[in-house]
Amino acid sequence: MSTPHRSPRRRSLSGSALAALLTVVAVCAGDAAARVFPYGSRHRSVNDLGNQFVPFHAHLWDLLHGRARGGLLFNWQSGYGTSFLPDLGTYLTSPLSVLVAVFPRADIDLAVYVVTVLKTAAAAAAMAWLLRTLHRGPWWAAGLLGASYALCGWSVIEASYNPMWLDGLIAFPLLCLTGEWALRGRRMLLAPPVVALCWTANFYTAYMATLGAALVLLVRVVLTREGVRTRAAVIARAAGTTVAGIALAAPVLLPLFLSSGQAYPGWVKEFRPVSWADLFARLLPGTYSFSSPAVFVAAGTLLLVAALPFHRSLPLRDRLWWTGLTVAVALSLQWAPTHLAWHLFATPNGSPYRQTFVLAGIAVIAAWTALEGGLPRLPALAAGTGLLAAAALWARTSTLTTTWGYALFAAGLALAGAAWWALRHRRLVLPAAALLALVLIAQAAATTAFGHRGKLGGLDDYPSWGQGHTARARALAAAEGWPAYRTDPSRPALSGNDPLLLGGEGGSYYSSHTPEVFTRTMVALGAGWTSRGRNVQSIDNPITDAVFAVGARLQPDGSVLRAEVPPLVTTRPPGTAPAYGDSPFANQELLLGARVYEDPLAPGVCRAGTEAYLWAPEYNATARLADGPAFRLNGNAPRNRAALQPMGVSRGASSALVFEAAPPPRWTLSCLDRPRLDAAVAALRATAATSVRVGSSGVRADLPAGSTGTAVLSVPAIAGWTCNDRPASAHLGLVAVPLDPGTTRVACSFRPPGLLPGLSVAAVALALLVITAVRMRGTRRRDGEVPGGSGSVSGPG
């Protein structure tokens, strides 16, 4: 079945190229069939793709083009200033992410789509290369199996809208490759950088991929090496290169881990395994669910895996180990202790089966192993078909199955079986291989399209960049005044990260690293949230605008509301440390340092001329003043919390508060006296910094002579701030500097916690690698060998 006149390296390259090509064709065909962006009018940016990943890639575009507020360490645009290195390491450190820079910024959705497709294709190519490295076999078969891996159900349904998870899809075959190098005692200097690349690109899925690669190596060691010392030496080499690689990634990993510990706690959920009917249903094409493992791989691959135990041309030992590993990993998905082990011992928010790609990869390796002894004979294919038919029959009680999914599965299985049987005849190799490719493309494209239907029907979706985005971005740019004041994109928002997507330096922020101190501070001041506190919204309120130096706020009609506000650094008089209470109105006054609200004259009625503000965090309906427009409050606890809502200027009794639904158990109406606020802002401006200079991760300010008390930087007091050569203090959740007598300057800088230790760990690891390289070079010279070639990547010899 191989092509004798081609070199092994060329056949490996051909297999990788074929895998990448088939993957691109299948993904694009499925997207086109679903008529989603960029092939149709339907939005592709569902859930976190539109809410997080597109905006973060837009910020990366700004960084690469020198237009961002902040740098690699700090992000001035989100959450009134937050650490950026953890977000960079979580979402953007894939080498392919930088390709967004070659697209126009207005095409950021297209840029993210292209990067997503390229990541999937890269995973296919990497798997095909790995297969050819494990043992000889037809290059086109490696290409088909590599594409089957990259087009597994987990990839096209779940990871396609979580692009950073696709880095784990790439990492698994690469980490298996480093294990193979350890097995053969080769490329020991190249392995650590490869491991570092995988862990830097996305540590979360790289962790899972590392566990999977370790299991693959264990089976390879048992099957190919004899003796405890020999096997232990292989394991030690693999462990050493893996630890060294992770150490090289420490400058990103340590800040990221520490930031995760300081983030607002997410949804705590107890793991409950799905039924076996649902598990077997996900073997079929055309199924959709985020709560069950999408283990689908193409019928041709599944048939080889199912036929493996019955393939008598292979040694029984090989069949037992690879079949056992596949079954064991499948069972580990369903057992709570191993489930936790796969997920860093914490059940994740959302999909609880994020490790499914490892099972797909191991299944593909098992399928490739089935070809090591030649093509399975008819009895093995028949037995494998029977196993898959039994699994499909078991799945009939699952609500996830569909009639056309069963039809696609049955047709694909029949055609794949015929193709694998036909490949025994030399004249039929080309048409049989083409038939397998067509089955692969058809099933993967159909699953992709079906996944889009499920996501668009059940998840929030966000519009691709259009005229509305352009209009808002231009309005924000025209109002820009940083660092004299902030410009906030405000609400209603197009995404959870509008400051990154559209511009400005706003209060909204959505990330896995949203700091707890930021969420709690903003909630104390009346902010709303979604995603159980990880997606904090900006507050449309003149008092918080004053204390956060928001001098321009985008309005729903596209206009910009401007205000005279204090600079980023203000001072507060000496006194005891204040603390927030239960009322957001009182908390705002405490942070401002003045009384500006008054109670209603009667329940639900503010004095004429004052501005009414409603706080009803659990209310999920509209409310209005009797003579004013209705406003929607989105308080669906615990997922959503309604923001403190401006209701308009009161005209007295005719402006009584009206709830369109049953009033919530907890609500407060308070009335803002604008002249009092103007006086309070003027007082803050009078004692504020006389000049403020902002760098990529620091602030310098000059204070009036004789300043006393506390200087307050209008930035959340997250860990990592140092001011005047001391760790920063906090004032009601903001960065603060106690002022010594005669202090007239404040210099604050931010460094992510863990960065210096991470750099130290990486430096030690790099030094050890250099020493090892020098020693290896000396050994080669003493042995009379010509150095060179040790760092190259090659396929099987």
Image (cartoon, helix red, strand yellow):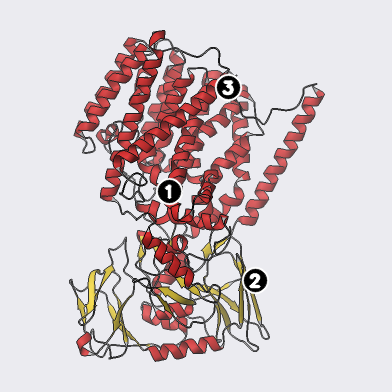
- Report which quarter residue 654 is drawn in: bottom left
N-terminal of the two: label 3 or label 2? 3
Residue 455: give x, y in percent of width and height: 30, 47
Residue 726: mark in rendering = 2
Q: Against 362, is 729 above or below?
A: below
Q: Is residue 423 left or right of residue 789?
A: left
SS for tag 1? Answer: helix
Residue 295: name its quadrant.
top left
Q: Is residue 735 visible?
A: yes
**Disc 2 marks which amino acid?**
Arg
Q: Between residues 678 and 731, which one lies in front from this camera angle?
A: 678
> Is label 3 or label 2 in front?
3
Residue 371 or residue 27, whichever sits in front: 27
Quadrant of res 774: top right
Q: Is residue 321 above or below residue 565?
A: above
Q: Residue at x 59, y 29 (%)?
A: 235
Instruction: Report the amino acid beneath label 1.
Output: Leu
Task: Give the amino acid at mark 3.
Answer: Arg
Q: CA distance from mark 2 to mark 1?
A: 45 Å
